[in-house]
Structures are given as C-alpha cells and as structure tokens.
Amino acid sequence: MDNKHTYYVSVGSQEILDNAETANFDFEIRATLDEAQELMELFAEAEDKDEELISRAATPYESFEEIPAGKQDIRNDAYDDKLQDIYRLIYRYAVPETKDHIEKMGVL
C-alpha cells in the first residue's frame, strides 16, 4: 500500500502544505509523513545557517577581511549546501512536472 500523500512545498517560506489552496507553493511532491518531516528538518537546518549569516552581517567588528583566509565563505557555503540538500530531497519526491521545473532551474 502506498502511504504517500501529495504535499505542496514553498522553499522561500519553508512550508510544506497538504492543501494547494492554503497558500502559494513552488513544488508538488509525493511523500510519506516521515519523508515530509525529513524535509522540514532540512528547512530548520537551513534556517539555522541563515541565522548565522544574519548574525555575521549584524556584527560590525567582524569584517570580511578580518576573517581568516579560507574561512570567509564557510557560513555562506553551509547555507548553500543546505539549500542544495533541500532541492535534492524535493527532487527525489517530486511529481514529474516538479522534476522538470527543478531541472530547468539548474539548481542541482
């Protein structure tokens, strides 16, 4: 028996909805509750990385030049990596139209 359910995902607002009419969404996926929860966990991890970037931007004494060489983009890279993980997971559970859309976006 297929325990998959249709969910509607908004990456920008980090939402997974079970009703397409509730709000705007970017992608449609078919996933189990556990799989949808896995995506929510990735959203939470990306939010943590985003908050790290915001805190760095709000710290006037930590200029980009003062950060040791090789460490300057680590926070940016960590956030970008999480976004890549999110898009990979969405792609894994995507309906065919969503897969096509993600492929055209070129984010993977």
Image (cartoon, helix red, strand yellow):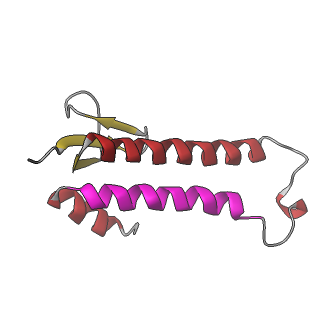
- Could you tell me which residue is drawn at 55 percent across and 46 percent down? 45
> Residue 55 location, x and y as percent?
74, 42
Residue 14, picture quadrant: top left
> Residue 35 location, x and y as percent?
31, 47
The span shown in magenta is 72-94
* Residue 81 painted magenta: yes
Q: Tell me: residue 69, above or below residue 43.
A: below
> Residue 81 location, x and y as percent?
54, 62
Q: Is the magenta stretch mostly helix, strand or loop?
A: helix
- In the image, is 86 to the left or to the right of 79? left
- In the image, is 60 to the left or to the right of 17? right
- Could you tell me which residue is drawn at 25 percent across and 27 percent down? 22
> Residue 75 location, x and y as percent?
69, 57
* Residue 25 painted magenta: no
- Could you tell me which residue is drawn at 30 percent across and 60 percent down? 91
Q: Which residue lies furthest to the top in this view?
A: 22
